[in-house]
């Protein structure tokens, strides 16, 4: 599975995530999606932690296909909101999972808060040779008051990583992928896969 142009199943139907992760992986791995395998239904993620959700998604695909695969779950954790929205980030403003609604709700809830500290945290669950492995990536930053930038997705337009003045949505994808939570978690995955050669 590991090596140049090896195929690996990414248990997501989120095209934004797919594009971002393929960019992180470069041409080392070719991502295969559930749709490529004939699985078009929503993949369940109904637990209360990122770890459990990532494992649930990976197990769902593995049980259906028997193929080694990985899944991720990501949350934005805001200090002023005691870590919310966290595991509920994608559906913070409702089951419609509308990013604009989520951002509006978040900005409304921290209006006037002096503490703008937040972090993105990604957990990647890999099932490889029927064994489960977890990898984590974290990036710290701050929430700003207004959306800026056209790149990225989710909360990227209001998140400025520490050490930067631009939001994730203003940074080129190549730059974001050097420092992002998802990039760090995927790097752990890649290092593990290379170690299995």
Image (spheres, grey):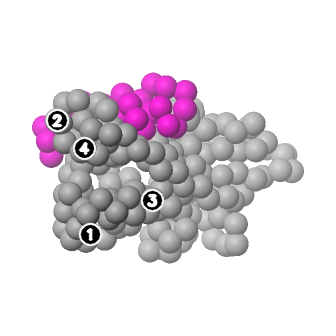
**Residue at image mark 3:** 188
In the rendered image, residue 14, in percent from the top left (x then y), is placed at 34, 46
Q: Nearest the camera: 91 or 55?
A: 55
What whole-number distance in Å separates the C-alpha atoms at marks 4 and 3?
17 Å
Q: Is residue 145 above or below residue 59?
A: below
Is there any visible trace of residue 120 in the rendered image? yes
What whole-number distance in Å separates the C-alpha atoms at marks 1 and 4?
19 Å
Residue 143 is left or right of residue 157, and the answer is right
**Residue at image mark 1:** 28
Q: Is residue 139 above or below residue 59?
A: below
Which residue is pictured at 61% across the width and 65% down the height?
167
What whole-number distance in Å separates the C-alpha atoms at marks 2 and 4?
13 Å
**Residue at image mark 4:** 129
In the rendered image, residue 37, in percent from the top left (x then y), is placed at 14, 41
Residue 114 is left or right of residue 28, and the answer is right
In the rendered image, residue 157, in percent from the top left (x then y), is placed at 58, 58
Which residue is pictured at 42% across the width and 38% down the height?
54
Q: Is residue 29 above or below residue 72?
A: below
**Residue at image mark 2:** 65
Mark 4 or mark 3: which comes first in sequence?
4
Range shown magenta: 36-57
């Amino acid at each position: 599975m590991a090596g140049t142009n090896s195929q690996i199943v990414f248990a997501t139907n989120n095209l934004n995530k797919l594009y971002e992760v393929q960019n992180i992986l470069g041409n080392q791995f070719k991502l295969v999606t559930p749709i490529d395998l004939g699985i078009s239904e929503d993949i369940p993620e109904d637990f209360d932690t990122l770890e459990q959700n990532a494992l649930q998604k990976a197990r769902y695909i593995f049980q259906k296909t028997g193929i080694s695969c990985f899944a991720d779950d990501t949350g934005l954790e805001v200090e002023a909101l005691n870590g919310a929205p966290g595991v509920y980030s994608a559906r913070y403003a409702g089951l419609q999972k509308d990013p604009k609604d989520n951002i509006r709700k978040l900005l409304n809830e921290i209006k006037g808060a002096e503490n703008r500290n937040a972090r993105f945290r990604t957990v990647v669950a890999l099932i490889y040779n029927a064994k489960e492995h977890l990898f984590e990536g974290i990036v710290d930053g701050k929430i700003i008051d207004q959306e800026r930038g056209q790149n990225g997705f989710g909360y990227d337009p209001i998140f400025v990583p520490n050490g930067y003045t631009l939001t994730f949505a203003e940074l080129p994808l190549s730059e974001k992928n050097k420092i992002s939570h998802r990039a760090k978690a995927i790097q752990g995955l890649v290092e593990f896969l290379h170690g299995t050669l």
